[in-house]
Amino acid sequence: MLRIFIAITDNEPGVLDRLASTFRRRGFNIHSLTVSPTLDPAVSRFTLVTDLDDKAARAAKSFLERLVNIHSVADVTGTTPLLRDTVLLRVAATGATQAGLFQIANLFQAEVLDVGADSMVLAGSGSPERIEAFMTALRPYGLLEMGRTGAVAMQRCAAAASLETAVSF
Amino acid sequence: MERPPQPPESASASASARAELPGAQIIWRCLEREGVDVVFGYPGGTILPTYDAMVDAKVRHVLARHEQGATHMADGYARASGRTGVVIATSGPGATNLVTGLATAMMDSVPLVAITGQVPSPLLGTDAFQEVDVTGVTIPITKHNYLVRDPRDIAPALREAFALARSGRPGPVLVDITKDAQTRAAVFDWEAAAPRRHLRHVPPPVPDDLLAKAAAMIQGSRRPLILAGHGITLSGAHRALAAFAEKAGIPVAATLLGLDAFPPGHPLFLGFMGMHGSPWTNLAIQEADLLIALGMRFDDRVTGDPATFAPHARKIHVEIDATEVGKNIPVDLALLGDLKDVLDRLEPRTPSLDTGAWLKDLDGMKALFDAPTWPRVRKGEGMSPVDVLKELQAQAPGAVMVSDVGQHQMWEAQVMRHQRPRTLITSGGLGTMGFALPAAIGAKIACPDAEVWAVAGDGGIQMNSQELMTLTQEGLKIGIAVLNNFNLGMVRQWQTHFYGDRRSASTLTISPDFPMLARAYGLRGALARTPGEAAAAIREARAADASTLIEFQVDPEASVYPLIPPGARIQDMIHEPPSQEAPC
Ligand SMILES: Cc1ncc(C[n+]2csc(CCOP(=O)(O)OP(=O)(O)O)c2C)c(N)n1
Ligand SMILES: [Mg+2]
């Protein structure tokens, strides 16, 4: 089952290495991973999506929590967190199919980033499900290349206070 | 990261605290302020500035003969004293030689600080001479590590390293310091370098309602059993354990590293559990209705097949490291916190149970296995290794025992009665051959007035025998018992039991003349082939001024029993060698 962890960490070299190493040595595969500084530039936020059963997820969380650089780890899987993911897609496009592609882009509020002689590059953003739907719609045209950020997650207002405010030192 | 410029030096009272010093001197100031009295190490190019500054430092340096030896010395020092051990090495090969020692300390939760030199920061990442990414290499075998490239970061890194090494579940921390960070100067400000992050993951005190829950579980139990692990010693909880066990009337079984956590002669003490534990101890686990696991981690050498481990028992786990809870064995109640604090607060809430019937059952089990004659080895050619250890026990009952890894380690654990905490030092988690001699040196330096014995096999003693030189150099007196069974005995035993006795690379057909080797290093050497010679050799070694290595030639075919095959059920324990005909 896909698990979504949010880790709040020190923003310093080596944190990613330690975090990844914690997963690697136990054979836990990382599905996607995003990192960026938080409102406090000395602190980073990781969103980590991974495929683990309950026991492994509990273990992963506590192994991460043991790392010195890590302030907190939340398994937000069950809280229906807000997720955003961005995809860049190169799609086969001929004069005849361009119009259809523009229509799909419009429907998904995607951007057309570039148009070439026989392909187009589209950027879509949204929940992972929405991106899947976007790709399904484009697939018949011929997908040539994909780059995807992986999910960034945040808990709903009702679910929790800011994870960042939990940071003490 | 850019830092604000340092304020100019003032002539105020804090002037000395704010003086600029080369990084190398800051290192020694920090070690002195941390109360370090001895470091173990080996010099080389990138750590030379620090060795130069050491000339003026008030810290004793013990020059080992190999960095692995130095790390085990620091480890033995830490285990024997309860203080943090310090090891220093150069970059590259010096640093990689620390790896086995760090992993050993990590597995057994030993507080160590390792300081390594690193190539000058402009050369980092260029595959410079003797450059190894040692922080990368040691991520999985340290609690934390640092790459320090700026002299201003030395004091904060070292202070945090010491705080981390001993806080929560202790362990090794490595600080890798570039050569230019050692030579460049910075303000040394001890106060400003105060650590904070070490407190991040130390659990808050266990709430009262959980203690009440534990007390209720104890109240409802008729066959309770305490499993005592290394955490007892690490948290200084042996008195608290005795008070708790006595008040509640609960018997105590011990892991390998918990054997010195409870008085061996105590009527509640059941002894050694696990793969080579005593049969009544393991059977008690299978019969118990409540296990109170104290600072132990349900290692596979303890549980055997986890699915059939302690099938009737509810489980309370007292542990400071949250990752251990439910990792190997599911538990009913976890008390996350410092063991001594938990036991001190649990004891007054604990009922006095009437466990008379249960204790009588256990006595019955002991009688079944004829406990006084325990442990048994098959009678074969030559002296019994168990008899040698019994003789050592008789002559040196209060000694600090430092064992290596193999059959002799298990016999040591079965035979010797470790009277006080920190009198059994051994590599439990990693099982590192070559540990005993250097760790015994560290233990002796930590406890100069204690009698210290290293017990090693003919295999393991050769893995760090170069440290015999360090013994003589430092003028230390310890005893070294080499149980020479002419085999990598534990490997041979597994081949006997699990590979149809096909012996593959387990016979040590040729070894050095051990007493002569000892003499070559300036020690006393002795050979014992009979029980009489053994008793005399031990007597003479104890009376002598210098360290003595005694080679005890023992039965090559003796095996350690009982033996629970790896992953097997406890009730499948083996008590004797396979019969000749049995196909394996
Ligand atoms: C560094 C290392 N290498 C290999 C092993 C695997 N091993 C475990 S016990 C053992 C045999 C030890 O032989 P010896 O030191 O003679 O002790 P004995 O078992 O004969 O008492 C070996 C090779 C180990 N534990 N550590
Ligand atoms: Mg041997």
Image: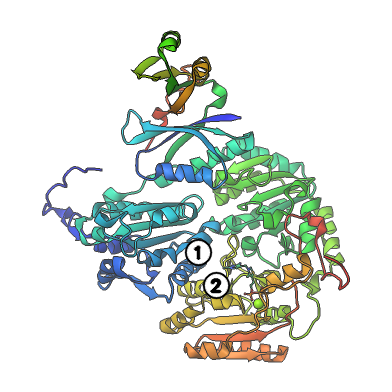
- Residue drawn at x 26%, y 43% is B1
Give the label on residue B100, or none: 1
- Residue drawn at x 43%, y 28% is A147
**Disc 2: which chain?**
B
Residue B569 in the image: state x and y as whole percent. 79, 54
Residue B482 in the image: state x and y as whole percent. 61, 81
Q: Which residue is mark 2?
A: B434
Q: Which amino acid type is shown beneath numbered disc 2?
A: Gly
Name the side, left or right, on which B260 lies relative to B136.
right
Q: Is residue B544 visible?
A: no
* Badge 2 vs badge 1, beta-carbon distance below 8 Å: yes
Label 2 CB, ligand 1: below 8 Å?
yes
Labels 2, 1: one chain: yes
Say above or below: B41 vs A16.
below
Name the side, left or right, on which B85 lies relative to B234.
left
Q: Could you give the CA–CA distance between mark 2 and mark 1, rounded to whole angstroms?
A: 10 Å
Ligand 1's image quarter is bottom right
Residue B128 in the image: state x and y as whole percent. 30, 61
Name the side, left or right, on which B554 lies relative to A139.
right
- Residue drawn at x 80%, y 76% is B378
